[in-house]
Image: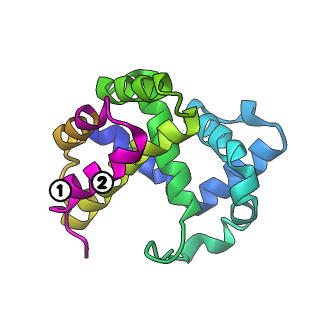
Amino acid sequence: MQDDMIRELSTVDRDRMHRVWELAKSGNLNMLNAEEKRLGEVMLEHEDQYAKQFEMADILRDHRFDLESEEDPFLYIALHTIVENQLEAKDPIEAYQFFNDMRKKKVSRHDAINLIAAMLAPLIVSTLKQNKFFDLEKYKSLLKKCKGKKPYKIFSLLDKDLDSLPHE
């Protein structure tokens, strides 16, 4: 799981994003490996939101998004892709179970993925800031704790559970 997470986070590479975008938007997903194809599919799914940023991904190569004041479309797409891969592999199973629980509650597929990404993102950031291994047990615990909850209550649960993570 740790190696998969690190490998998938490498999809934030802007030059690669730009190349994948160019092939995806021209309908050439078949020219991509499986990982890049998934990334391209996620990018196409978010085309209305982020097409301009995808077009300029190679130019934005060195731009660092201030996550306090702006959304990083490349990080968002990378997280979305990681969650998609977890769901397909059913690994961790808790992500798959949480997703199914949200879908039974009539939460859209996209919103259910975003809820999982909301649990995943702070843990990844903490991992990178502390230069430590990803806390898979904490992630599974959050997924289990939030499963069965109403979607609107999940963010307040996350706020409480993630307060102990470094915020610098």
* 56 magenta-colored: no
Please identify the quadrant where the N terminus is shown: top left
Q: Main secondary structure of the magenta part?
A: helix
The numbered dot on residue 156 is 2
The numbered dot on residue 132 is 1
Residue under the point 57% across and 38% down? 110
Relative image position of residue 163 (x, y in whole percent): 19, 62
Figure label count: 2
Instruction: Kindly check if marks 2 and 1 are in contact, taking CB atoms under 8 A apart as contact.
Output: no
The amino acid type of the residue labelled 1 equals Lys
The numbered dot on residue 2 is none
The amino acid type of the residue labelled 2 equals Ser
Residue under the point 27% across and 58% down? 159
Q: Is residue 49 toward the left or the right of residue 110 in the image?
A: right
Q: Quadrant of residue 168?
A: bottom left
Tell me which segment is drawn in magenta: 144-168
Residue under the point 77% across and 45% down? 23
Relative image position of residue 67 (x, y in whole percent): 45, 72
Residue under the point 69% across and 42% down? 45
- The correct choice, above or below, for 53 with respect to 122 in the image is below
Packing grade of label 2 (10 A; few <14, some 14-19, many >=20) is few
